[in-house]
Image (cartoon, helix red, strand yellow):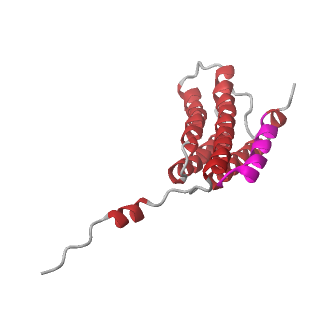
Amino acid sequence: MIPPLIRFGLPLLLIWIWSMRQGGAPERVGASTLLAAEIASYLAAFVGNRRFLAPDMTTTIIDAALIVALGVLALRANRLWPTFLLATHMITVLSHFDIVVNRHLRPLGYAVMQIAPAYLGLAVLGAGIWRYHHRTIQNGAEPSWRRPSSSRSAANAPPPAPIS
């Protein structure tokens, strides 16, 4: 049996390297965020519950921090894929609550809800890197980040009325 570190960590590391070489800033931030969460989860496995019988508080905190980071990325990036990546990892966070509420959830079901979204997230990130790379080849550079809404509304606002 292949250890989880190699089964998931190796593809994640390869996608991280790919994002550093051919991705834009959001792709690099997304890949680095996933890599940091994976390293933290790997280290937490030494102190936590990895038999999927009950929620592990350390992993729950790591997943919640990942959701916050991916949410900020989805709001700031001038890309669509971070929204899908956020959605895949929401399943993981919801699994922590599901095991608490639904005590009859089998460990296999909890494990699938924990692990499967991570692989789907890798596919989403890989697709985002691939699309960015091909878009920049075809169209040239594009903005990585959205402009803040305050600067957009200020630029489009009508001039103030004169005081009489």
Return the residue found at the far front: 138
Count all numbered tags in the image, as a single digit. Answer: 0
Which secondary structure is most common in the magenta stretch? helix
Where is the C terminus found, in terms of image quarters? bottom left
Q: Is residue 56 magenta?
A: no
Q: Position of residue 157 (x, y in %)?
A: 30, 65
The magenta-colored residue range is 8-24
In front here: 83 or 50? 83
In front here: 141 or 15? 141
Q: Is residue 11 magenta?
A: yes
**Residue at figure coordinates x 76%, y 47% from the top left:** 18
Q: Position of residue 21 (x, y in %)?
A: 76, 52
Where is the N terminus found, in terms of image quarters? top right
**Residue at figure coordinates x 65%, y 53% from the top left:** 24
Return the residue found at the far right: 1
Instruction: Tell me the quarter of the picture where residue 67 sits.
Output: top right
Instruction: Tell me the quarter of the picture where residue 4 sits.
Output: top right
Q: Position of residue 37 (x, y in %)?
A: 70, 46
Horizontally, residue 25 falls left or right of residue 72, namely right
Q: Is residue 54 visible?
A: no
Horizontally, residue 100 falls left or right of residue 32, namely left
* Vertical position of residue 123 compared to residue 80: above or below: above
Return the residue found at the far left: 164
* Vertical position of residue 104 compared to residue 70: above or below: above
**Residue at figure coordinates x 35%, y 62% from the top left:** 153
